[in-house]
Amino acid sequence: MKYAILGAGPAGVTAAETLRNVDPEASITLVGGEPEPPYSRMALPYFIYGKIDEGGTHLRQDPLHYNRENIRYLTGRCGGIDAQAKRLYMSGGEALEYDKLLIATGANPIMPPIPGAHLEGVETCWTLDDARNILKLAEKGSPVVLVGAGFIGSIILEALYLRGCDITVVELAPRMVARMMDETAGGMLGRWCEAKGVRVLTRTRVASIKQGAEGGPRLSVGLSSGINIPADLVVMAVGVRSNTGFLVGSGVKVNTGIAVDDYLQTTAPDIYAAGDCCEGVDLSTGKPDMLAIQPVAVEHGRIAALNMAGHKHRHRGSLNMNVLDTIGLISSSFGLWQGAQVGETGKLVDEGGYKYMKLEFEGDKLVGAQCVGMTDHVGMLRGLIQTGFRMGEWKDKLLAAPERLREAYISVAQGAPNAGPMAPHVNTPRAGLGHGGASGH
Amino acid sequence: MLKALVIDAGKCTGCKQCEMACSLENEGEFNVAKSRIRVFDFHTEARFVPYTCTQCAEAWCQQACPVNAITTDSMGVKIVHDNLCVGCKVCTIACPFGTVNYNASTGKVIKCDLCGGKPACSDACPTGAITFQDAEQGGFDKMKVWAAQSANAATHEGPNTPKASQASGSGH
Amino acid sequence: MGWTGKILRVNLTNGSVQSEPLNMEWAQQYLGQRGLASKYLVEEVDAKCDPLGPDNKMIFATGPLTGTCASTGGRYSVITKGPLTNAIACSNSGGYFGAELKFAGWDMIIVEGKSPKPVYLRVADDTVELLDASEIWGTSVWHTDEWIKSKHQDPMMHVATIGVAGENGVLYSAIVNDLHRAAGRSGVGTVMGSKNLKAVAVRGTKGVKVRDGKAFMKATNDGKKVLAENAVTGSGLPTFGTQVLMNAINEAGAMPTRNSREVQFEGAHDISAEAMATPRKSDGQKNLQTNQACFACTIACGRISKIDEKHFTVVNKPQYWHSSGGLEYEAAWALGSNTGVNDLEALTYVNFICNEQALDPISFGATVSAAMELYELGLLTKEQTGGIELTFGSAEALVKCVELTGKAEGFGKELGLGSARLCAKYGRPDLSMTVKGQEFPAYDARGIQGMGLTYATSNRGACHLRSYTVASEMLGIPEKTDPLVTDGKPALVIAFQDATAAVDSSGLCVFTTFAWTLNDIAPQVDAACEGNWTPEKMAEVGARIWNMERMFNHRAGFTAKDDQLPPRLMKEAAKTGPAAGLVSGVDKMLPEYYQLRGWTADGVPTNETLSRLAV
């Protein structure tokens, strides 16, 4: 069996390893789009502020890992796919035969059509190479304009802050992290940043970027409000779109992302998709959506690989969730954080203490949550939402006192032994006896 | 022989000796806020429940880690490698048991690693509420839960879930 | 090490908070908690000050072993000048609050002045703030605990708070932490209320370190082994709680009953540990749900009880149907034997209310008991009690009393004065079973002679926890003495007083001394702290503390006359039991006690004694 995997992010690497696990004899080729070892974009901010070196961003630390697993790793861009011939073409001309193909090409950052966006010093923060560029430009005290205060922008914000940059954040939406949390939480994050000396300009657009005045900072960023801000560096973090251009004419249907069925198979035979580039099912809505987060990429990668190897595994949906550290203020959101269509909400707000907790119920099940300033045992929120435990009497208690989440979790999880906390998750092959032999076969 | 922490909440008095032993072992000081095991106090129900990582086979934390900083050892224990952890906290939201916690003072996450095979918490427990036993014999309750869960999974997935093919670490 | 080396000073008058280093020289002389905080109080507060005025200070103090794995290492004390007694007050509590304060990085909090409006203090490591308490002023301990945790979205905070009793000036108001552990005696909660300080909420994420980790683990493990193998600490207390004493003390004829008119209570068995653990006839459930340990405690004597939902006290009050802190021996005695009430469920309810409103159940029960005697004598009328038929044995009357006292409503206002002031007001000061204004607890001075001297000389007013000679006289710990004789008791009391003062200064619980002597404790302290802590040094620290406390009281105006027991115990002989025919021999013991202490015949420490002990 010949497997090809396009994309060497978490989905691709996990898929390659899973395939090797279940099919020791197969030929597996993993294609990375950048001339780097497989690495994690999520680790880039930590590289930027010096917590780790480049090696620390690698998905697997052992350089011989792929050799040892007998996974052929090559880098290059895919130019197109002939689904009938089961062949893909690299942009360098090389052709690659496959029996089964996985597309895990992720997403690319959007560069908004702003005059001057091509100028030197305007960077995205998406690839390892981008990060290297930013390192050169973001010195201590450098004026930096960060365009976009979504989830990714906010992560970059912390890295720039810790490098000591003088930061102005420009965000079109009325608040920070508008697609991850509500007004209260976004407002808290904004005030927190301002208290740390970061300028946060919401409801603001970048109108143009020009060369800066002689002797001053390299660039001048013109805002919709009419003011101009000097900057040595402009970081664009306004969003990403799925990286699927090469699929034109391949028979693989692409909506916003690649359309897949419950087994992560695309509309083309023997072609599967996983991770940020595809529209897997959102557990909360039951509908296809792009959940561009690491745990979902890994989950997709594993399930797609199992299906490619002939072990049927239905993907029952992934839970949307995010965690963000904004200069020390940690926030998270899970599932239907905006609330169910018909549901009830329990919330606690401590504006002065930068603490917020909001729980969303549908019936007596927890379906979504947001937290600011709370980290201990926060994963219990995922456990409750994903498992769909019936909260029973704890629902009213949590509506009145959301901070009692941990007690509720332990009560409910221990009180209902026949609804294991793992219930909605797919069981995957695992090595050895595992624990107690109860490994889900 | 695989061994597991077995918790009998009915025997717990809420003294937190386990939390202190854990923090001393792992942090070199008495500091229950940084304990990997935690006793929850259900005051109105007259119940105390020690709670920590079950070293679950699914290894959600490990799967979620973007830099391979969590691995599974030959005993099935999920171990955080401090030198690799970047502190992104994704494992803390990914673990559905909530047993991986962020330690702001180090900027890394902490979880139970069974103290390398000799858990300080069970040694310190004065009432036998926490014991370290053969997983086969002692993990009965845990197995019950898993059995229910795998039955559940089987209904959804059909019977052809593949067996593992190799005995090394899970490699995911 | 052991100590964090930091004190938090909070001035309520001007709203300031500041950190200052712990005086390490004093720490070597007074160890911590009771001793060290008393030293600060003695140095900083005029002994003659109004205990409820802004010049009084109150100190929340941990010991060097608080927040360590030493068994019971979670204690804290509140030290102040007490309003019930006008003497130095030191009330000790368990639960988790003390350890949490230590984890937040503080050995002590010194509270000064008076806030212009109700506030609560929030301590989260180095973040310390005084916050508006107007929303919780006037509410119960239980509500306050919940409100603060919710407000700060942190159920892992630990809260020490007053209830309405402390706000309303009830003179024996407690400070309750963790819902049902209390710094109970002498009105320390009243002082807190007088300062407009509703609560202290702490959350700590810093560590406690010890001097020599290896030696510490060995010493504490050795200590835990001794506790586990001892019959009292290894089995009696965890199984029965302090209530293990109820039947034993009753049989010994040392159970003060109906305001000490009698020494045995016919209903003792109905309110004993055994009764708590036996299924009720009414609903087949046990009163006792489980035992609970305080922080780090390997004994776990705490009781968690649940009241019969059909019982008249709670029948329409589901808010009391859950489990909470149940009866300890002193409370069961004060609320039960002393009032003649043998209704276990009623006593549990009254105990819940004492926790919820933060009342000291010993002083409350003893005050009700005195009021019952006044009522039976016709000195208090039904009109004066607001219609309460205040007879001995009436559970209904007891319940009404507790519901009124914390709120200071109706006759509750009178009860809030405590027994000494109440009896004086109604013309019979002799009927108050108090020393220095504080009600004595559950051991009759006729049946256990050493306890008479204990009460008489206790620096915080009558108290069993200053020298628990019951251990020797009843249980044979460390060696058996005859409870009915006075010979040798002055020396015994002194040895217990000094050792206890040292234990109370360490962060450990005095209940460990059922099994431990200073020989077990000193190695644990020594491994945690610099300073070569031998058993001898511990005992000397204890003696130093005792004399320092005595001198504070002396300056406050106390004399040998205040070392007297109520006349009933000196004149009315025990009627039944082993002590039948006996009165307390405290008058015979006091001169010898003063002499052994190195005090004048008037009970004042001599200059020689003070300089020998470097007070």
Image (cartoon, helix red, strand yellow):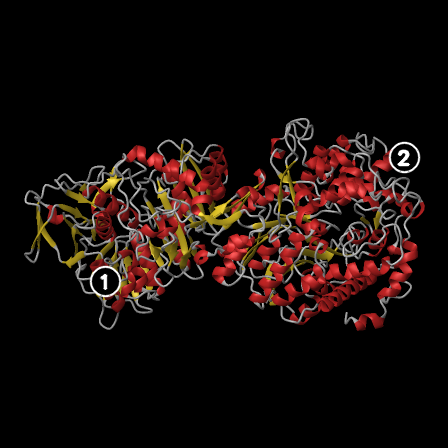
Taking the image as shown, residue B92 lies to the left or right of residue A233, namely right
> Residue C548: x percent and y percent?
77, 65
Residue under pointer 1: A64
Residue under pointer 2: C377
* Residue C9 visible in image: no
Amino acid type indicated by mark 1:
Leu
What is the quadrant of the C terminus of chain C in the image? bottom right
Taking the image as shown, residue C35 lies to the left or right of residue A378, namely right
Vertical position of residue A83 compared to residue C2: above or below: above
Q: Secondary structure at mark 2?
A: loop
Tell me the chain of label 2.
Answer: C
Task: From the viewer's side, name the closer residue of B131 and C27.
Answer: B131
* Mark 2 to mark 1 CA distance (whole Å): 95 Å
Give the foreground label among 2 and 1. 1
Amino acid type indicated by mark 2:
Leu
* Residue C563 visible in image: yes
CB under 8 Å between discs 2 and 1: no
Q: Residues within 10 Å of mark 2 (few under 14, many from 20)?
A: few
Q: Secondary structure at mark 1?
A: loop
Q: Please tell me in which quadrant of the rendered image residue A77 appears.
A: bottom left
> Residue C291: x percent and y percent?
63, 43
Q: Residues within 10 Å of mark 1 (few under 14, many from 20)?
A: few
Tell me the chain of label 1.
Answer: A
